[in-house]
Image: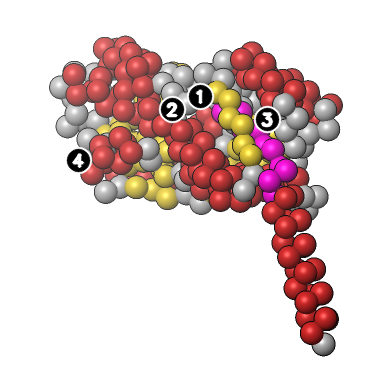
């Protein structure tokens, strides 16, 4: 009996060591669109923390919002023999080349936050951006009594986030005849650009009741422009992402609301899914990440 117990314990130790070795042997690549946006910094931090917790290696590259740079950085990750690629696309169409390169190398691909256009991936992890845009639009309509003039600051053209958030927002606007979107302009998901675009819109539009920005960076830029024009009391601002600066602006009453994604959780879920893929497990084609409207 003693020999059997010792043998069983030895087998358990061997299995445990093998599982640990398997985890250590997994190498993930994380290709981020830009780390100039605090949202994607949180996503990266969540992914890297989960990778450390699970005992796997993760290599992170930053495209700095350059689609060509993202392709080049993905090619570098493939040379380093990653097992799974997690990519947050700069552009949903341009990223197809990078995904094709990974698939040609036999590397499964997971997209996170933004989707790829016209190509299949192993899994996509993101918030429902259409639902989030609609949530923002409904909030604005309710706050204005379903009647008012609204500006839409759009994200980078070609990204699924800009397209889907805009789609949901405009679905909400279309429900109410009294709601009018008087200006739609892209501002690149960028704070400085959001401020410049909003300054120009303010000059040509003396009547604006609300601004919906496809992300908080643009919302914060718009907030600065509106404050500089002395119109903060006239115009409500709603953003998207719930980054720390936007949450603080909501608390201080400078922004009315922001749609909260959970980028850290998104990063964690991407790594968990990637590990399953590396181990040959089945994963869902799409995993939604919950949303919440922050108003205080």
Q: Which residue is mark 1?
A: 34
Distance of label 3 from label 2 (alpha carbons): 20 Å
Distance of label 1 from label 4 (alpha carbons): 28 Å
Give the extent of the magenta segment: 23-32
Q: Is residue 65 above or below residue 15?
A: above
Q: Which residue is mark 3?
A: 116
Distance of label 4 from label 3 (alpha carbons): 37 Å
Q: Secondary structure at mark 1?
A: loop
Q: Which residue is mark 2?
A: 37
Q: Quadrant of residue 73?
A: top right
Q: Is residue 138 above or below residue 4?
A: above
Label drawn at residue 6 = none
Q: Which residue is mark 4?
A: 252
Residue shown at the point (74%, 50%) measured from the top left: 22
Residue shown at the point (63%, 39%) measured from the top left: 57
Crowd rating for badge 1 (residues with CA inside 10 Å; few <14, some 14–19, many 20+)? many
Assign the N terminus to one quadrant of the image.
bottom right
Q: Are marks 1 and 2 in contact (CB under 8 Å)?
A: yes
Q: Are marks 4 and 3 in contact (CB under 8 Å)?
A: no
């Amino acid at each position: 009996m003693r020999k059997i117990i010792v043998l069983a314990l030895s087998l358990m130790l061997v299995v445990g060591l093998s599982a640990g070795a398997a985890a250590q042997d997994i190498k993930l690549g994380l290709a981020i669109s830009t780390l100039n946006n605090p949202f994607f910094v949180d996503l990266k931090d969540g992914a890297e923390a989960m990778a450390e917790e699970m005992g796997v290696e993760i290599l992170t590259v930053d495209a700095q919002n350059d689609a060509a740079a993202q392709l080049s950085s993905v090619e570098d990750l493939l040379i380093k023999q990653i097992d799974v690629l997690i990519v947050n696309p700069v552009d949903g169409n341009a990223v197809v080349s990078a995904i094709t390169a990974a698939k040609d190398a036999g590397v499964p691909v997971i997209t996170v936050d933004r989707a790829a256009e016209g190509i299949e991936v192993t899994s996509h992890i993101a918030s429902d951006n259409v639902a989030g845009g609609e949530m923002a639009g409904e909030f604005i309509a309710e706050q204005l009594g379903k009647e008012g003039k609204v500006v839409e600051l759009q994200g980078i053209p070609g990204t699924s986030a800009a397209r889907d958030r805009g789609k949901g927002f405009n679905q909400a606007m279309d429900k109410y005849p009294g709601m009018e979107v008087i200006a739609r302009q892209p501002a690149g998901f960028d704070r400085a650009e959001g401020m410049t675009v909003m300054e120009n819109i303010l000059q040509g539009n003396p009547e604006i009741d609300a601004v919906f920005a496809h992300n908080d960076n643009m919302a914060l830029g718009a907030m600065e422009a509106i404050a500089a024009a002395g119109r903060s009391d006239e115009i409500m601002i709603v953003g998207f992402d719930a980054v720390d600066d936007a949450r603080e602006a909501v608390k201080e009453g400078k922004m009315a609301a922001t749609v909260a994604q959970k980028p850290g959780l998104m990063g964690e879920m991407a790594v968990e899914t990637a590990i399953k893929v590396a181990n040959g497990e089945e994963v869902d084609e799409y995993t939604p990440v919950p949303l919440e409207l922050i108003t205080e």
